[in-house]
Image: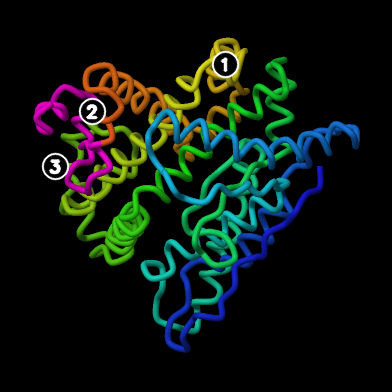
Amino acid sequence: MTVQSPKSPESAGETDRTKPVVDWSLAAATGAFLVRSGPVVPRGEADTAVTELRELTIPAEEHVRELTGLGAGLPLLPGEVVDRPAWVRSAAAGLDSLTHKALARENTPFAPVLAAGAGVQTGVVLSFLASRVLGQYDPFGGPEKEGQLLLVAPNVVAAQRAMNVPARDFRMWVCLHECTHRLQFTAVTWLRDYFADEVERLVGGLADAEGIGDLLGRLPDTLKEVKNRRNLAELFQSPQQRAVFDRLLALSTLLEGHADYVMDAVGPAVVPSVATIRSRFTERRKGGGLLDRLLRSLLGIDAKIRQYAEGAAFTRHVVAKAGMDGFNAVWTSPNTLPSRAEIADPDAWLRRMGR
């Protein structure tokens, strides 16, 4: 399926003294070259899928606003429907924008070689993800870097066919999830800058680490915590990095779980087959061959899947006890976001909020 392609990332803003650690243009080109083609779809079916996905984003966001109470008065905008290579290019551009400050270093003779190597590696990862992502709201993407909602048409069609669920229902269901993400960042005005600042702290801290000596010095304490941490990256973080990581993990879990809750809670009047779709989609998330499962584990995708369930459980619990207005207190400020511990214990967050 061939659809509109966003522009590749540009490097016009780079200074003479600093270059990005990752060559994002090369990452985009590598990922777009390596990504597998989508399913073979008759032209009429492809055109219907693209048209419906673009058109459904507006009523989907209306339903999300009605349920959540977020976004009143904001413009209702259609999403952008793309193919897999276009998603790769857009993802690379968004990552470039998000990490530009943190992932910059002095321009040394070896910098271009190192950046090219990182670009190729990043492109390989993006090519793997590009065949799995159904949609995405990138708060740092788009021509003006002000946010962009993307729907990956070939992946939506492939998933719908594999699960054998009604096409229009599934497209609406996906749009509900992605429009919830768009509202999170557009209705909660401080969220975009907060997220960018936290990512810069985390990435900048990793880039400025004191090297192998610092890691070895922390090794005894690190080994004691192996059973309590979820992934290898956490084992070698400083206490400061770990605190930022925990905040970002809690935020990501909240955002994904909230979107998962909304896409199901909107109800069968909007998506008549929602129960069937959810059941089959949950099973599909567990699938894949040995290599696929290994890659998913290495890339943190399995951890991401857990986030959906944990964040949705937090959202359901809080809404059941405090109502949607009570839940929406999470969006008041960074201080009202649930911590990583509170995601697992929503009653603790409710007590802290006095609810």
Whether residue 130 sits left or right of residue 321 in the image: it is right
Determine which of the numbered discs, if any, sits on residue 227 in the image: 2
Determine which of the numbered discs, if any, sits on residue 221 in the image: 3
Q: Residues within 10 Å of mark 3 (few under 14, many from 20)?
A: few
Whether residue 307 sits left or right of residue 285 in the image: it is left
Which amino acid does the dot numbered 3 rest on? Answer: Asp
Q: Residue at x 48, y 34 (%)?
A: 301
Q: Earlier in the sequence, mark 3 or mark 2?
A: 3
Q: Residue at x 28, y 66 (%)?
A: 208
Whether residue 272 sits left or right of residue 179 in the image: it is right
Q: Can the viewer see residue 133?
A: no
Question: What stretch of residues is rendered in magenta?
Answer: 329-355
Of residues 63 and 244, the one nearer the viewer is 63
Label 1, on which residue?
269
Q: Can the viewer see residue 229?
A: yes
Q: Earlier in the sequence, mark 3 or mark 1?
A: 3
Position of 71 relative to 230 (above/below): below
Q: Quadrant of residue 12?
A: bottom right
